[in-house]
Image (cartoon, helix red, strand yellow):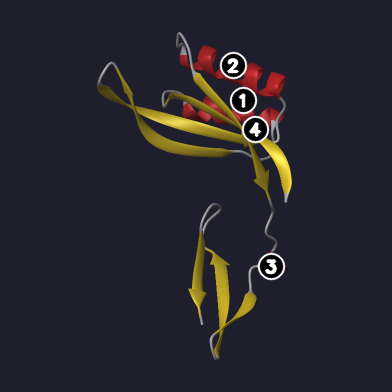
Amino acid sequence: MRRQTIHRVYTEDKRRATIVRAIAKQFETFTLQPTTGYYRGKPEKSIVLEIVGANQSQAKWQAARIREINRQASVLVITQSGRSKKITASQLQSSIRLSSYSYRLSCIAVSNQRLLCLWL
């Protein structure tokens, strides 16, 4: 596993397609999560964009661009340091031994962000 910086940008879900196009120009991979945010006690549709491995200036520039696209006074950026590991197709199946029984963990990708795993 290697240490990387993770940047999360929180913003209103106003112009999602424009935001995605802007981020995709600079980053090959990122995650967009729809969520509900609260502003002054009232719910609003929001999104969280997560970018792993970007440097601070790239994340700051992208957050400023998102703020402009959504015409907001501000967006929230949270930066964390963490460990990341890519799991390849050959690593999706592994065997373990539990007491006297042998189980196999089999996983299949059901979408870009989800895996279905079963112990067999």
Q: CA distance from mark 2 to mark 3?
A: 37 Å
Of circles 3 and 1, which is in front?
A: 3
The residue labelled by disc 1 is: 22
Which residue is located at x 69 percent, y 29 percent?
25
Disc number placed over residue 91 in the picture, else none = 3
Residue at 68% across, 66% down: 89
Residue 97 position, x and y percent, is: 59, 83
- Find the distance from the CA under tag 4 to the CA under tag 3: 28 Å
Asked if marks 3 and 1 touch (Cβ < 8 Å), the reply is no
Whether pointer 1 and pointer 2 mark residues with C-beta atoms closer than 8 Å, the reply is yes
Residue 77 figure quarter: top right
The three-letter amino acid code for the residue at tag 3 is: Gln
Residue denoted by label 2: 65
Q: Are marks 1 and 4 in contact (CB under 8 Å)?
A: yes
Distance of mark 1 from mark 4, alpha carbons?
Answer: 6 Å
> Regarding mark 1 in the picture, which secondary structure is present there?
helix
Give left or right: position of 9 versus 53.
left
User: Callout 2, which amino acid?
Assistant: Arg
Q: Secondary structure at mark 3?
A: helix
The residue singled out by tag 4 in the image is 24
C-alpha gap between disc 4 and disc 2: 13 Å
Q: Please, what is the three-letter code of the amino acid marked with disc 4?
A: Ala
Residue depth check, mark 1 versus mark 2: number of the one nearer the observer: 2
Farthest residue, direction front: 99
